[in-house]
Image: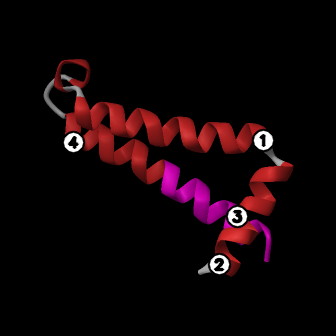
Amino acid sequence: MDKINRQIMKYFGKHPSFNSLVHLLGGIGIGFLLTYPVAGNHPVRWGLAFLGLSVLGHVWALQQTK
């Protein structure tokens, strides 16, 4: 697990704008899960979609370092 963290941190260190985008998407996802009125009828769907994009961004960073 430590090796994976180091690889992701290495990629994010070289690409700070991608790092910001991935973590912004994660924050938006958490925000949607916490606030119902913004997302209308589907806060869980929107929240999980943004969190999924954030996780995919982390997987992308891991794949790029191999």
Q: Please tell me which residue is depicted at 69% across the width and 44% down the height of the picture.
A: 19
Q: Residue 22 lies in what quarter of the image?
A: top right
Quadrant assignment, res 46: top left
Which-is-in-front pick, marks 4 and 2?
2
For the residues bearing labels 4 and 2, Cβ distance under 8 angstroms = no
**Residue type of the residue flagged with mark 3:** Ile
Give the mark nearer the N terminus: 4 vs 3: 3
* The residue stretch that appears in magenta: 54-66
- Say which residue label 4 marks: 44
Task: Return the disc, 3 or 1, that comes first in the chain's sequence.
Answer: 3
Count residues near mark 4 (Cα–Cα under 10 Å), then give few for <14, some for 14-19, many for 20+.
some
Question: Residue beneath label 1, please?
Answer: 16
**SS at mark 4?**
helix
Residue 35 image position (x, y, % from top left): 23, 26
Would residue 45 be counted in the magenta stretch?
Answer: no
Q: What's the CA distance linking mark 3 and mark 2?
A: 10 Å
3 and 48: which is toward the camera? 3
How far apart, in angstroms, are the residues tagged by discs 1 and 4? 28 Å
Sequence-wise, the earlier of marks 4 and 2 is: 2
The three-letter code of the residue at mark 1 reads: Pro
Q: Residues within 10 Å of mark 3 (few under 14, many from 20)?
A: some
Q: Do residues under tags 3 and 1 come within 8 Å of each other at their CB atoms?
A: no
Q: Secondary structure at mark 2?
A: helix
